[in-house]
Image: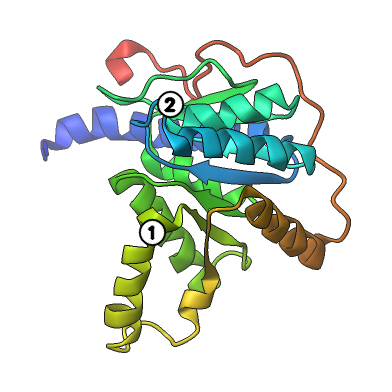
């Protein structure tokens, strides 16, 4: 990290403006989406993977039940969920992160926002979702999972459903949490009630519907789908020298 005062005064104010701009533009865009569910999972699964197929099926069912679908906008599970939502005629949102490798926007989105900052993107995943469905994934998926349950546990957000899809993948982690976290008193006895593990898209979507109706009443559906995503929309268009 460069601690040169001159560099700080020249560069840091621009970084603050970029962050503010990402918040403002992404909030403006996402506020028009309507009731939505955030779907997370690995970027590395292929269309032949059973979890790709399950994510696609789950997204279709979410749309049929008047939810929009939010993903990270990349390949793998994210592509599957965006694909299912688009095929069902619903709103398919991608919150894409600019990375030097791995992350490339998938072609199945009708709302696309590009982010430079992970923390701004993560706010949008949570702020505009009525629930969370996690498919098998790596560090990023685990990060989102633990952040979601932490926010709910600490009552920083409403108590939304957190569904772990794929019992064969998640049961080991769940058993560890029972033995180590709950067993050693690191969490409250009922904290694990925040989590549902299932292999059923129908059960996952039913949880989302019950939770929404309990908190907001009748589900009238997502906002109307607008024109296709603006190619490469980014929340801040800084000059190259400002990046």
Residue 214, by quadrant, is: bottom right
- Near mark 2 (Cα within 10 A), the count class, few <14, some 14-19 or many ≥20, is few
Q: Which mark is residue 170?
A: 1
Would residue 87 be seen by someone viewing this image from the given angle? yes
Residue 87 x/y as whole percent: 69, 22
Label 1's element? helix
Say which of 53 and 185 sits in front: 53
- What residue is drawn where x is 82% and y is 42%? 221
Question: Nearer the observer, disc 2 or disc 1?
Answer: 2
Would residue 26 be found to the left or right of residue 60 on screen?
Answer: left
In this rendering, position of residue 218 left or right of residue 200: right
> At 55% across and 10% down in the image, what residue appears?
231
Q: Quadrant of residue 138?
A: top left
Category of crowding for the residue at label 1, using alpha-carbon neighbours closer than 10 angstroms: few (below 14), some (14–19), many (at least 20): some
The spot of residue 207 in percent (x, y) is 68, 60
Where, quadrant-wise, is the C terminus in this rendering? top left
- Residue 109 lies, with reference to residue 13, above or below; the image says above
Give residue 190's position: percent from left, percent from top: 50, 84
Residue that numbered label 2 is attached to = 48
């Amino acid at each position: 990290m460069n601690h040169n005062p001159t560099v700080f005064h020249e560069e840091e104010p621009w970084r603050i403006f970029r962050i503010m701009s990402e918040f403002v533009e992404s909030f403006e865009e996402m506020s028009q989406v309507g009731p939505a569910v955030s779907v997370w999972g690995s970027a590395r699964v292929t269309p032949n993977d059973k979890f790709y197929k399950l994510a696609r099926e789950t997204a279709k069912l979410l749309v049929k039940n008047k939810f929009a679908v939010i993903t990270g906008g990349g390949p793998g599970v994210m592509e599957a969920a965006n694909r299912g939502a688009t095929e069902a005629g619903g709103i398919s949102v991608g919150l894409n992160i600019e990375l030097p490798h791995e992350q490339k926007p998938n072609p199945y989105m009708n709302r696309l926002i590009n982010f430079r900052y992970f923390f701004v993107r993560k706010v949008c995943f949570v702020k505009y979702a009525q629930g969370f469905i996690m498919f098998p994934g790596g560090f990023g998926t685990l990060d989102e999972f633990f952040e979601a349950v932490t926010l709910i546990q600490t009552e920083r957000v409403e108590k939304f459903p957190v569904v772990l899809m794929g019992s064969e993948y998640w049961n080991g982690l769940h058993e560890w949490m029972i033995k180590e976290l709950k067993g050693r008193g690191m969490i409250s006895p009922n904290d694990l009630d925040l989590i549902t593990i299932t292999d059923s898209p129908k059960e996952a979507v039913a949880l989302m519907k019950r939770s929404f109706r309990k908190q907001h009443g009748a589900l009238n559906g997502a906002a109307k789908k607008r024109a296709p995503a603006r190619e490469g929309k980014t929340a801040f268009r800084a000059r190259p020298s400002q990046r």
